[in-house]
Image (cartoon, rainbow, N blue to C red):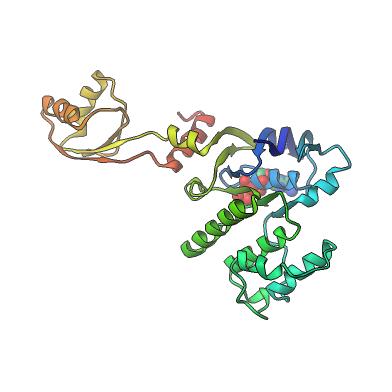
């Protein structure tokens, strides 16, 4: 798989604050690449740098193989669509007119494909309604339509799911998947909620305090998320020494509930518990959450665990 975008040791400083620290990333062509980080981690700054809204302090990036130091980057950047912070739309224009204006800005003279584009973002029935009267989700979707006007190879979306209601989140996810599958557009999307990205991303980079903590594919992530069994027992206190002795990995929730991460059969768990005079009330699958995985990574960086 070729990379649409690569960064090498990108750094960005604001005064003395190092907001990006040696960010090295490869975004494969055709991927939906999730950039996951807490508030203030540096997601927007990274997106601002690669879209040309801010200059890196040091380091380089390349788009479609063209380095940012090459003057050709200006024309290559036209192959990139983005929504950073808020969508670039005119509130006093309808959805159709917003898209038409962008076509004109790009020097396009035929407007035949506008209905298809509005259909793709599920805005074909908004008629003369002005964008200022749109819901947040509609404005985001119109922003995506505008960003798609130049048929970009890559779409860069900064927290497009933020603030949307559950229905709006599902709609946005389906639209992004459609854009990726039908138009083969690579998507770089940021969020502070891994769980939401996990329903569409094919690759991930975790960022914290301007540093990339880990990059991995969705299948690698899924295999790393630990399988757990949730036990409800009469006493976790009595069971812990038994599990310690047997080198069973576990985490105690409270006096009666605990998760174990080792591959033990139910009968083995029951036999170990009974040996310690502990009653097992229930055993259920309780896989470690994606959010838990991400928070563990961040905690390791902070030296908490
Ligand atoms: P959020 O989800 O809150 O937008 P983020 O991951 O996108 O977070 P950034 O907006 O990139 O994070 O900010 C990273 C850090 O850089 C923050 O500490 C922020 O205060 C700082 N920062 C961003 N832009 C500037 C600026 N123009 N001048 C000074 N500091 C800045």
Which quadrant of the rendered structure holds the C terminus? top left
Residue 109, visible in the rendered structure? yes
Q: Which residue is at 66% across, 35% downward?
A: 26
Task: State whether residue 141 is above or below residue 92.
Answer: above
- Residue 6 sits in quarter: top right
Q: Which residue is at 49% across, 51% downward?
A: 196
Instruction: State the image coordinates of residue 181 (x, y, percent, origin top left).
Output: 59, 51
Task: State whether residue 243 is above or below residue 215.
Answer: above
272 sits to left or right of 41: left
Instruction: State the image coordinates of residue 226 (x, y, percent, origin top left).
Output: 38, 33
82 sits to left or right of 213: right
- Residue 139 sits in quarter: bottom right
Q: Which residue is at 67% across, 56% downward?
A: 85
Q: Disc count in the image?
A: 0
- Residue 113 sits in quarter: bottom right
Residue in the foreground of this view, choosing between 11 and 255: 11
For this orientation, the residue located farthest to the right is 71
Instruction: State the image coordinates of residue 11 (x, y, percent, origin top left).
Output: 73, 35
197 sits to left or right of 1: left
Which quadrant of the rendered structure holds the N terminus? top right
Q: Which residue is at 68% across, 36% downward?
A: 2
Residue 159, visible in the rendered structure? no
Instruction: State the image coordinates of residue 194 (x, y, percent, origin top left).
Output: 50, 45
């Amino acid at each position: 798989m070729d990379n649409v975008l690569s960064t090498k040791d990108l750094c960005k400083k604001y005064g003395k604050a190092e907001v990006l620290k040696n960010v090295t990333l490869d975004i494969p062509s055709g991927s939906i690449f999730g950039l996951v980080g807490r508030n203030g981690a540096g997601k927007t700054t990274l997106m601002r740098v690669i879209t040309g809204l801010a200059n890196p302090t040091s380091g380089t990036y390349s788009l479609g193989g063209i380095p940012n130091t090459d003057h050709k980057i200006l024309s290559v950047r036209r192959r990139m669509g983005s929504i950073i912070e808020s969508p670039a739309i005119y509130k006093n224009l309808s959805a159709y007119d917003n898209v038409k204006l962008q076509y004109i800005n790009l020097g396009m003279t035929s407007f035949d494909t506008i209905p298809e584009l509005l259909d793709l973002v599920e805005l074909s029935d908004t008629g003369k309604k002005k964008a200022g009267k749109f819901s947040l989700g509609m404005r985001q979707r119109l922003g995506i339509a505008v960003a798609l006007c130049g048929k970009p190879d890559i779409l860069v979306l900064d927290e497009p799911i933020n603030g949307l209601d559950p229905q709006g989140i599902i709609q946005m996810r389906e639209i992004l998947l459609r854009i990726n599958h039908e138009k083969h557009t690579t998507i770089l999307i940021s969020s502070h909620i891994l769980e939401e990205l996990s329903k569409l991303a094919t690759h991930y980079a975790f960022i914290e305090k301007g540093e990339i903590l880990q990059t991995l594919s969705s299948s690698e992530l899924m295999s790393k998320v630990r399988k757990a069994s949730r036990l409800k027992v009469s006493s976790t206190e009595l069971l812990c020494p038994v599990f310690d002795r047997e080198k069973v990995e576990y985490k105690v929730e409270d006096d009666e509930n605990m998760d174990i991460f080792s591959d033990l059969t139910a009968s083995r768990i029951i036999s170990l518990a009974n040996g310690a005079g502990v009653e097992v009330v229930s055993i259920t699958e309780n896989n470690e959450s994606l959010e838990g995985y991400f928070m563990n990574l961040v905690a390791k960086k902070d030296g908490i665990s």
